[in-house]
Image: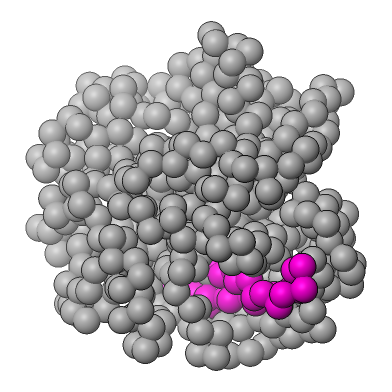
Amino acid sequence: MRVLSWRLGIRPSNTRIPFKYGKASLTECPQALLELVLEIQGNVIRGYAADCLPPLWFDKSEDRGFGEQIEDMLDVITIAASALSDFGVIESVGEAVRVLWSTPGLSGRPQLLTSFGHSMAERCLIDALCRKSNCSFRKILSTGALYGDFVTELNARGHKRNISPWQHDHSSERIAVRHTVGLGDPLSNSEQQLDDGISDGLPATLEDHLRHNGIRYLKVKIGNRGLEDIQRLMAIWRVCELTAGWKISFTLDGNEQYSSIEEFEEFWSQLRSIPELRMFTDNVIAVEQPLNRMVALDETATSGLREFSSVVPVIIDESDAAKDDCWQALCLGYSGTSSKACKGVTKALINRQLIAECQNEQEERQFLVTGEDLCCVGVVALQTDLALVSVMGLTHVERNGHHYHSGLNYLSRGCYEEIIQQHGDLYQLVNGVPALKIEQGSLCVRTVNENGFGFSVDPRFDTYELIRYGE
């Protein structure tokens, strides 16, 4: 196969509730759509990938404004698409990934940002191959048609390991939603924190999501704010007790706000010393990325990690930037990593296989991969990510795009009917707009599992503003 041309478009979107993570507060966010036109065995096939362009996540450099960060994200997508276009004939996804991994990113910018650009091009290729074969992602992956005998070497601190991407189909028809509780999200209906202007018919508070959607998993964000974090967690737990009893499991997102494991362990000890939070801490599945990415893979900052991870698993997220980073984290004592399509599909599949092999070798130690979100929304970005976590056999996944956006209202209204027709198990109309259908705390992903790389609708590139293209 070879890339004949590509084009990149964007559409605006606005959040219904500000999304506060770390030092960022997201109120508006461009949605990007990349189209690669490929020749595959004499046929011209289009492949698509989409994602939001959030500030201060891929790159937390405070010296670059929102507009500059948007341009950086568009630039890395452009670099990746151009690299595949310039390469010529590509034999497989494995070869394409090697080309992308060897393609330099933006000078002086983080590897995580570069990996985002790679992931967009990579997702387009996989989508096109699914379309060419009229085959679902789970089937084309499990038959070996994507990677075959592709093997890569991981190298961390002198420890080398050869690994192939995960190529099994462990998908199921339903995946539980792990609902995000952001730093500024309204918790109870009685707090009256919401703007009266929110009238889209969708749940808005934590209490709403627990009651109406039956949520049983939560991802809770903290910010190294001492007493403020503790009071926030106590308020969250009170809502959970009143609304859902003790049936909630949690992941705790440290948002890179701690400088060492020792510092985070002090906070954890505080939590454990509070009787009212004992049930909360007993039900924490994992702690996600507590350390700043600049020190998260440093031996000094992670001193004591292996012992602490035996008490509660600690995983990386933002630090999972390059293909070796999960392996390096495991060597340091972390329990695993997060899966996000925006960080790379092949990298996620390599990490999933790595975790499975490590667990088989060391039964006494807990290893895990969690499914995480980047405020992604349908149809393309959300469903591609769901197809990925489904085939890896993850039983719950963080979803927050539906919480911070009013359904798919950023899309052209002309798309709505097709979305409901093709993916009525996943979406329902709420006030005339397609919105995620969460029932008893989970999503039905039957059509995601059955259709290409998660979606069968036309992304309608012509409804996006064309900003970059190449041949």
Q: Please say whether residue 178 is visible from this viewpoint.
A: no
Vertical placement of residue 378 versus 364, above or below: below
Q: Please say whether residue 457 is visible from this viewpoint.
A: yes
Query: Which residue occupies 48% across, 52% down?
Result: 387
Q: Main secondary structure of the magenta part?
A: strand
Query: In the visual, does 81 lie left or right of 278?
Result: right
Q: Residue furthest front?
A: 42
**Corner quadrant of residue 142:** top right
**Corner quadrant of residue 236:** top left
Vertical placement of residue 170 versus 183, above or below: above
Residue 470 on image: x %, y %: 79, 83
Vertical placement of residue 338 versus 449, above or below: above
Residue nearer the viewer, 305 or 372: 372
- Split into 4 quadrants, where in the image is the N terminus? bottom right
Residue 160 on image: x %, y %: 83, 25
Query: Which residue occupies 77% across, 81% down?
Result: 5
Query: In the visual, does 410 lie left or right of 354?
Result: left
Query: Which residue occupies 47% across, 36% down?
Result: 170
How many marks on residues? Answer: 0
Residue span colored magenta:
26-51
Residue 40 part of the magenta segment:
yes
- Split into 4 quadrants, where in the image is the C terminus? bottom right
Residue 171 on image: x %, y %: 44, 41
Residue 191 part of the magenta segment:
no
Query: In the visual, does 249 lie left or right of 395?
Result: left
